[in-house]
Image (cartoon, grey):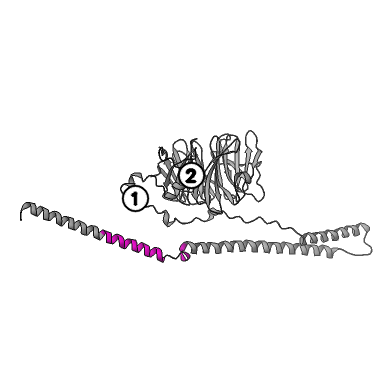
Amino acid sequence: MSSSNKNQFNSCQEEDDDDDENKNQRICLADDIHQVLDRLNQFHTNESKFLKDLKEWSNEAHDTVDKFYKSKHDEYIRRTKEDIDRSKEILNSLTSDHDASEDYLDWANNVIQSIHQQIDDFEQVKSIFSPLKIDNCLINYPSRISDLRRHSSPVKELFSDILLSSSSISHFNTNQSNKISFVNLKVPTHMIKLQSDNWYSLSANQTSLVVSEKTNLYLIDQSFTIIEKKSFIQIGIKDICWSNILSRFIIISPKNIYTLDDKLIESELSSINSIKNYPWERGTCCDTTLFISTFGENPFIIEYNIFPSIHLNKRWQSSIICKENEVISDMKSNENNLGLIINNDNNNESRLEVRSIKSFELIWSIYLGKGWLYRCSPLNDNYWTIVDSYNNRFIQISDHATIDQIIRYPTKPFNVVSWSLNQVVIRTADHLNIHNCK
């Protein structure tokens, strides 16, 4: 066989080997696809672990409510029985002796009339029960199957930093021609281990971070060291914000408002009183003004002046802020504007509204997508950052209602705050992640 024929034969043999290998790979891929499809077809939603856990949680919640009801029921019966027995003792001690003085008889008649009146009050009592309000953040859904990140082709990997689904593009006004990427979310520069929390409250000033963990507050310095710890067992920390004018952090709890100094020593703002049946939910400061929103549907926003004295300035009614069945999920401010995350409970959709701090006039609004677990933070004066733990996303929006980037976050991001001029801090279930801005 000539050298040229031999080379040609070897080349053909190699091509045949490559074809066989590609064929085997296609067969394996087809088998893998069928295997996954079989698993999806055999998956029974009603028998999923999440629903079983949810049912167990529901049973435990009902048990808690039943125990609470029984304690109130038994306490009422005990107190009422004590009152009846005491009244009987008083009546049995009265005498109808003919020698009793007129003053004694008048006093005895007053006692009898008083007991009659108390019995009338018992029989006609108007019970006042506060409605049981459920916070949607009590339960977090697991990651959706459709949220699993697709493996891009070699060409698409050139654009892997920002992956937008077709549904996102249809809802968002994206600035693809002049994209600005300020935040590098690939790897946090620092990570601080924390336990999970109910509200994942977080705030920052130029030099420090304050973060909640269960019933504790931590003060963290710029070397990422926890320098102070404070227990807040008696309250739930719904939100934290920083006041430049007071040089103190402000703690929002359902019933009370506190300030914290750099040693985490608290002082209650007793001049700010909670409103009956409307627990406080979120708070933010701008100059001498403190804005506080209420929890649940039909919320309103109270505007307080906090310097040089504390007094109520305005109350913005729910009809101005929200539509029916809508709630305020978050509220933050920059120098001129107030950012509100509004969630509609009916269709489970959220939007960001930016309003003027001075007039409360709506400047712009942008649709964010499905889900209710959105939190926001101003980034400098020109951008807003949004974290979406429902869809595991980080969203950066310009101050002209333009989406500049959407990044898939590796874990559920529950809160976000900008720190100094070049860092963004994201709170997850068990970490505080610090990212640099480009």
- Closer to the camera in the image, 88 or 170: 170
Please name the residue that numbered disc 2 is placed on: 386
Q: Is residue 26 left or right of residue 177?
A: left
| Residue ID at (42%, 46%) | 407
Image coordinates for residue 32, horizontal then vertical, percent: 32, 61
Q: Tag 2, which secondary structure?
A: strand
Q: In which quarter of the image is the C terminus?
A: top left
- Closer to the camera in the image, 397 or 231: 397
Labels 2, 1: front one:
1
Please name the residue that numbered disc 1 is placed on: 152
Q: In this view, does 96 lie above or below 410?
A: below
Q: In this view, does 104 lie to the left or right of 316?
A: right
Magenta stretch: give its range.
25-49
**Cα separation between marks 2 and 1:** 25 Å
Tell me the crowding category of disc 1: few under 14, some 14 to 19, or many 20 or more residues within 10 angstroms, Cα based: few
Tell me the crowding category of disc 2: few under 14, some 14 to 19, or many 20 or more residues within 10 angstroms, Cα based: many
Residue at the front extreme, as displayed? 170
Image coordinates for residue 3, horizontal then vertical, percent: 6, 52
Q: Is residue 268 left or right of residue 111?
A: left
Inspect this view and state whether residue 237 appears.
no
